[in-house]
Amino acid sequence: MIETLAEDARGLRVVARLTHPTAAGLVARGALTGLSFGYRVTAARGSHPRELLGLDLAEVSLVAVPMQPLARVIGVDSTKE
């Protein structure tokens, strides 16, 4: 479940809570370390590289190998409520 979603100095920052025990275990063990974003571009500038000015975010998924190398899980808090 996504708790916060915002743009910061590094890019899109996603803070999420994993409620599925298998997915949480895979992240904790380092098997799922990447993020995949599904989106539709609504505004852009340039072509190579293209600067995204607006988009509609459709989904965020945990993956083993992200298309964008920097789209990574950068922290895990394993404390329980």
Image: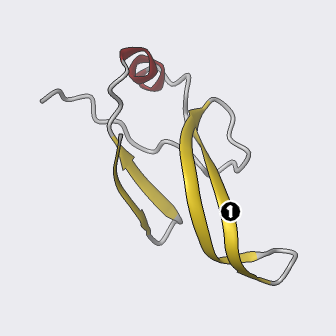
Q: Residue at x 28, y 35 (%)?
A: 77
Q: Position of residue 8 (x, y in %)?
A: 44, 70
Q: Identify which residue, 1 or 12, lies in the foreground.
A: 1
Q: Position of residue 4 (x, y in %)?
A: 33, 56
Most distant residue in the right direction = 48
Q: Residue beneath label 1, please?
A: 40
Q: Quadrant of residue 20?
A: top left
Q: Quadrant of residue 48?
A: bottom right
Q: Position of residue 36 (x, y in %)?
A: 62, 44
Q: Is residue 22 above or below residue 56?
A: above
Q: Residue at x 82, y 74 (%)?
A: 49
Q: Residue at x 12, y 30 (%)?
A: 81
Q: Is residue 6 above or below residue 77?
A: below
Q: Is residue 66 above or below residue 30?
A: below
Three-letter code, disc 1: Arg
Give the side of residue 17 with respect to residue 49, left or right: left
Total marks shown come to 1
Colour scheme shown: secondary structure
Secondary structure beneath label 1: strand
